[in-house]
Each structure stands twice: as C-alpha cells, then as structure tokens.
Amino acid sequence: MEILNHDLVCIGSGVAGMMASIVASNTDAKVCLVSKEPLGWGNTRISGGIISTIGSDKHTLSSDMIKSGKNLNQTHLLEKLLDNSVGVHELIESWGHLFVSDHNMSDQRKKIKPAGHSEARTMLSYQRGLLLANTLRSKLLDTNIHIFEEVIACKIILNENKVHGVLLYDWIKGKWKALLTQRVILASGGGGMLYFPHTDNMRSATGDGYAIGLNAGAHLIDMEQIQFMPFGITYPKGMLGIELGDTSAAGPYGVLRNNKGEIICSDLSNKTREEVSKTIALEIMKGHPTPNGGVWLDPTANRNYQDGEESWENWKTIGSLDPLKLANGTKAYQWKECFEVLPTQHYIMGGLLIDNKGNTSVDGLMAVGETAGGIHGAGRMGSMSLFDGLVFGKIVGNEVAGKYESIKKLSKDYLEEEKDNFINHVANQHGEQNTIKLKRELGHVMWKYAGIIRSQEMLVDGMDLLTKIEKKSHFLSVNWNKSINYQALEAIELRFMIQTAKSILLSALERKESRGSHYREDYPAMKDSEPLKNIVIHLKNGNLFTLLKGNSNE
C-alpha cells in the first residue's frame, strides 16, 4: 500500500470539488484532488451550463428559493450562499469561461428565467457545462494540486474521532493508497444511478459521498427529497432518461396531453419541476400512458408567438433540444409536432448535514455541492446547482486554506487493517452474485417504490426488496489485485448505493406528508399546521436511524 501525506484531500472533480481545490491551493498547502473518473468528467460536464446570478436583489432570490424549497431550506446556508456570491461569475470569466451575450444590449450577458425564478437572472454558458468543466480543469492543472484520476475513495480513516486520512482504491492499477490528512472535502456529486435507467446523471453518480460521510459519523438531511426533471426522453431505450429541460423548456404556450390527446397540464413554464413531474406520474398511474410509457408534450403553439419563438431559440442555444432531434426527429426539434416525455431523476436536494462553512459533525470532514444537503430544501430551482457549486466551493476552499496541522503518523499495519476491513465489508472472493445485475435490481426498486409517487406500503415493500439485494451483495466474487478492475469498482459503488438507497427510503417513510419533491399518495397534503422538521439520518452500530430536527426557517 502506498502511503502519502497531504494537507487537504478533496474527493470529486465536478464544479464544487474543482472550485474548492483551486481556492484552497492559493496557499502553500499540499492539496490533493481525487477523481473516480477522468478529471472533470462528471455531471458538470453534461449539465446545461446555466448559472444563476443574484438578479435584482438577494432577498428576492432567497424568497424564490424558499418558495421552491417549500420552506425546508436551511436559511443560514442560503444567507451564506447569497452573501458570498458577488464576483464569482467574473472570477470564472477571468479563467476563460464565456457567457452568452445579449446582442440587443451592449456589454450585457443574456439572461433567462428557468422554473422557479420570478425574474430573468440566469446566464447561459457557451458550450453548456462542457466549457465550465474545461475552464475549471484548465485552471486546476495550472496549480500545484496533486491529482489522482480513476481512483475511488473508499473510507475516511479516523483516529480519536478525527479525520486522519482517506483510503483509496486505484481501479486502473488494482492498487491501494492511503492519504494521510486532517482535512477531507466530500464533493463527489449525487446518486442518479440509484434510479437507472431513469436518470440523466453520469454513471459515476452512485451516492459515494453520502455513504462515505455516513460511515465516518456524519449525518444526512432530508434524503427523501429527490428531484425529477419532468421532461426526459422515453424512446429509444438507449436514450431513456436523457434530459430535455425543466418546465420552462415547454415554452410559454406548451401543454401536456395524455394518450387521448386531452390536455392534462398547461402554463407549464410557471410551474415547478416537482408539480409537473407529479402530474405526469399520476396520469400514467391512471392507465393513460403514451406508447412508450410517458405523456405527450405539445409545444407547437409556441411557434405562433414571438415570446414562444424566443423560448425555442433559447433552448436551442442551450443545446437541450439536440437529444430531442436524435430521438424524435427534426419536426419535434423544431417544436412543430408533439413528442413523448417521462420524468427522469436529476438531483438530490438532501445530503450531508453541514454548517455555513461546509463542516460536517466530524472533525476535519467537509462537504460541498450536491453531496451536501439543506440549501435547496424540497425543490431546487433551475440553474442553482452550478451557482451553489461555484459559490460554496469558494467558501469551503477559503475556509480550509492555511488551516493545516501536522499529520499524526499511522502505522502501516493499522492502515492495512483498515483496508482489509473495507474489503470484507464490500465483498468476498467466493460468491456467485453478479454486481451489475444487483445494481439494475436496485434501480428498478428505487424507481418503482421510491420514485415520484410514494406510499407507506410501497416504501416498506421497497425496503424489504432492498434488504434482499443487500443480502445478495455479500456474495460477490471480486478479485482485488487485477488491473483495470471494473469488477471491484462496481462492487464498491454497489455498497455505497445500497446505503444511500436505504437512507432515502428511511427518510421517505419518516416524512408523513407531501412536500416538494416528496409526494405521498397516502399523505397528499403538506402539514403546515405542524412544526416543520428536517429529517436527519445517522448510523449507529451498523444500523440507520432517523432524527427530527427543528427547521431553521421557522
């Protein structure tokens, strides 16, 4: 096992992880960034590249976020986010990022109004998220940050209840590493693959950070809040789940129709992602799906009005219509005919419980980006994810910069024991179960039993099925010593996915109301007459438990 020392280790190379690492590296500290994929190859790269600004004032934006989040947001995090956002767009522009300009206004960036926003305050990036990922990647490569690519973080190494390192597995070389440090930032993104194939996330989004943090002693908050983008591709199967945009992607005159052609939802651009996704799911449950299991999105009326034409031009510029052209053809791409849509898992609002500096309850362990929870409450507005990642990445990077202590040496025998314990926890070498098959079973369970529509019966059944998958997962056959070891990578991810999935189900069972992205058909209303609570998950003696935390919004 290779043993290295660093002042700071950041896990994840999306927008939040790269930003935090770049800012932290402005000191003489030894910073290391660990990426499970090639650097910058995650969800940031495939995002729409739309980034919110404060707009007219921070109070209006805060109000919009709380409204979309159904008051579940942690207000101290909102305040920190908005108070520290000044200059972040100019900063990434100075690194080479480009925003689309409005040619009708001199020196003015073009702005749009995605779902949930009360005004046009969101800027468009040239080349969508690809340019942002490449801009941050180029800036990061210009620093002295030590980078490990295609290496998965497995476990936080603790000593006296403090972070003392992180255990890594190089799945390309089949080798183990121990990075000794007293500061770890978890920025590994979300967990869309828990809902595969009904997700628009990259395959790397397997909930790693949630499970790693939980196993280290940190807490999760509001994991039941899973956001589904309402408009995803239904066919062909190879493109199932690819996102076509949020509710504003229907244009101001788009409507939804069932298989009989009847309008089931209008004024889409003024509704939240949660509202429209729920409407689609309920219509399908009534037995009125279109041929490929969705509903019809009819945007054709937009082409008759100037603002409808402008909306089409905007979404064409963003690039969200490109997959539509591939899946449904030119007429659908031009909004001249209806096309089928089905919600697709997009984002997890829940995550690790942090304070307004990004600290978890574990000394030395921080979280940022989609790995952290609490900022977006029960519903994230469009364009807020990259905004959150940039701003809080900067906050966390500044927080850790210069705050380093000498690292206590841990014996090689102790580290080898940590590695062996982790291997035994993940898989043995004598089982007959197939990891990919179990992942697919888990995805089916989560989509069917913990998807858009939920109930006590569904969630209990889902937990029972997940327990069976977990029992099967103890009988995998994994050779840990070979190179280019997808087998080991998949097994580690499966372990993280199971723990994250159980946290989602447990939180969903605990929240006996419908709020934001969490819809219970047995509790269809929000319980506004009762004190609002955040649901916190913690791990004790190998078992998950829930706590109810008073919401800071009240």
Image (tube, rainbow, N blue to C red):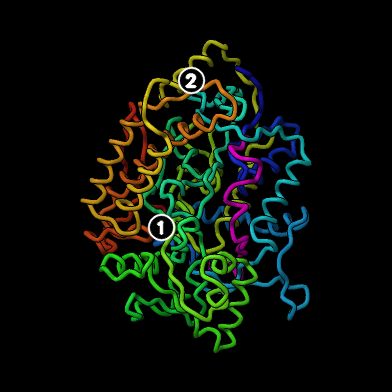
Left or right, 441 with respect to 419, comes to left
Q: Earlier in the sequence, mark 2 or mark 1?
A: 2
Which of discs 2 and 1 lies nearer the camera? The answer is 1
- In terms of secondary structure, where does tag 2 sit? loop
Q: Which contiguous range is marked in magenta?
A: 34-60
Three-letter amino acid code of the residue under disc 1: Ala
- Which one is in front, 481 or 272? 481
**Residue 70 x %, y %:** 39, 62
Crowdedness near tag 2: few (<14), some (14–19) or many (≥20) residues, C-alpha within 10 Å: few
Rendered residue at 63%/54% (across/down): 84
Say which quadrant the N terminus sits in: top right
Instruction: Judge whether 101 appears above or below 379 on screen.
Output: below
Left or right, 448 with respect to 479, comes to left
Q: CA distance from mark 2 to mark 1?
A: 36 Å
Rendered residue at 55%/85% (across/down): 303
Rendered residue at 54%/69% (across/down): 114
Residue that carries the numbered disc 1 in the rendered image: 378
Rendered residue at 70%/42% (across/down): 22
Left or right, 109 with respect to 192, comes to right
Three-letter amino acid code of the residue under disc 2: Glu
Instruction: Judge whether 463 appears above or below 59 on screen.
Output: above
Say which quadrant the C terminus sits in: bottom left
**Residue 19 x %, y %:** 66, 46
Disc number placed over residue 548 in the picture, else none:
none
Residue that carries the numbered disc 2 in the rendered image: 160
